[in-house]
Amino acid sequence: MFKGKTILTGVKPTGTPHLGNYLGAIKPAIELGKQAISQGGKHYMFIADYHAINAEKNPTVLNQKMKEIACIYLASGLNPNESIFYRQSDIPEIPEITTILYAYTPKGFMNKAHAYKAMVDKNRAVNKPDDDGINMGLYTYPTLMAADILAYDTDVVPVGKDQVQHVEIARDIAGAINAHYGKELLRLPEYYVEENVAVVPGVDGRKMSKSYGNVIPLFEDDKAIKKAIFSIKTDSRPMEEPKNPDEILVYEIYKSIAKPEQLKEMGEGLRQGKLGYGHIKNMLLDAVIAEVSQAREKYNYYMSHFAEVEEMLEDGAAKARPIAKATLKRLKDAVFGR
C-alpha cells in the first residue's frame, strides 16, 4: 500500500496523552510509518509547535508539552534512526513556503476551515462577535499545514476523518500553483483514513477525552491507573447474574487493548455469571499495565535525559531541511522567474 511512498504525520503538543490517544492515534501513526519504511518509503514525524502557539502562549507550558509529546512518541516505539523526527520550528523554510502559498490560497478556503468555523459557532452560541478571540494563526492554520505537507514531497498523510479537509486544501493549493506555472512544482498529496482505529470509551462511557475528565492515564503510576479503572461505571447486578458483555463498559474498553483470547475469557465469564465487576476491572488493569509499563519506563528515562531527545530532534531537522530547501528553491525560481 505504501511501497516507495513518503508519509508525513504531525502532532500538536497539547499535553500528556491518555490511553485513548495512545491506542487510537500514537501507536497507529508509528505502525504506519514503520510499514512505509519497510516498503522502501520514508516517514516524516514532526511536532507542530508553530500550530500550538495559536492557543498556548505560555512558553514554559508550551515547552513542557513539547517535551512530553516528543518523549511519548519515542517511548511508544518511534525509531528516530528510521523515521525523520523533528520540530516544526526547527525548519525555517516552512514559514517561507507558507508565505508563498498564501498568494495562491483563496480566502474562502480559510472561511470554510473546520477549526475557524468551530470557533465562530462557539462565539455565536454565547452572543459574541464572530471573530472574538480568533487570531490569524488559527485563521490561516490550513495554509501552514499545507506547507508542512508540501515541503517534503509527501505522498500520503494519515488523518482522522475530521482532518481530511486539511489534506484537500493542501492538494488544491498545490494544484493551483502547478497549473499556473505549467509544471509540477509541488507533489499532490493523498489522505489516508484508517477505518479500524480504536475509539476508546472513557470511564463514564463517553469518548475518552481530557475535556470530559474521563481518561485512563497513560504513564502515571499503577495506583493512578487503578484509581481511574475502578471508577468505571457499573451497575449493581450480582456476579452470578449472566450479563451481555457488549452492555458492560469495562468490556468495551477492554476490547481496545486485550488479546483475542483475553477478550473471549472476559466475555464468557460475564455471560456465564462467573466474573464480577471487580474481577473484570482487575483484568483491565493488568492489561493496561502490561501494555504501557515498558513504554512508561522509557518515557521516564527520556524525560530525565532530554538532552538526548534534543539531539534526536536536531538530527531529524538536519535530515528534513534539505528536502524543504529544495522545495522552497523550486517555488522561488518559478515565482520570481529565476
Image (cartoon, rainbow, N blue to C red):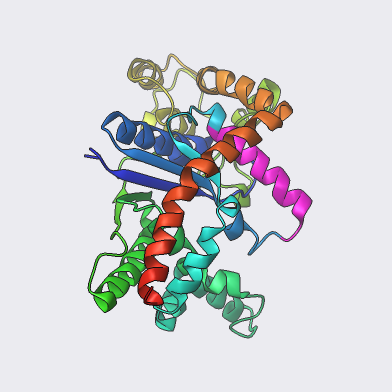
The residue at the point 46 percent across, 68 percent down is 143
Q: Is residue 288 above or below residue 129?
A: above
Indicate whether residue 169 is drawn in magenta.
Answer: no
In terms of depth relative to the viewer, which is nearer, 310 or 24?
310
For the image, the number of numbered tags is 0
Whether residue 232 is visible, yes or no, is no
Q: Give residue 194's position: percent from left, percent from top.
A: 32, 44
Indicate whether residue 59 is drawn in magenta.
Answer: yes
Q: Give residue 32's position: percent from left, percent from top.
A: 35, 36
Q: Is residue 264 above or below residue 75?
A: above
Question: As drawn, is 106 to the left or to the right of 136?
Answer: left
Q: Which residues are magenta?
A: 57-73
Whether residue 164 is visible, yes or no, is yes
Q: Give residue 285's position: percent from left, percent from top.
A: 56, 21
Q: Quadrant of residue 131?
A: bottom right
Q: Give residue 86's position: percent from left, percent from top.
A: 54, 43
In terms of depth relative to the viewer, which is nearer, 315 or 19?
315
Q: Which residue is most to the front?
A: 338
The residue at the point 66 percent across, 27 percent down is 302
The residue at the point 31 percent across, 70 percent down is 172
Which quadrant would the C terminus be assigned to in this image? bottom left
Question: As drawn, is 323 to the left or to the right of 11?
Answer: left
In terms of depth relative to the viewer, which is nearer, 52 or 207?
52
Q: Is residue 185 above or below residue 239?
A: below
In terms of depth relative to the viewer, which is nearer, 149 or 196?
149
Q: Quadrant of residue 29?
A: top left
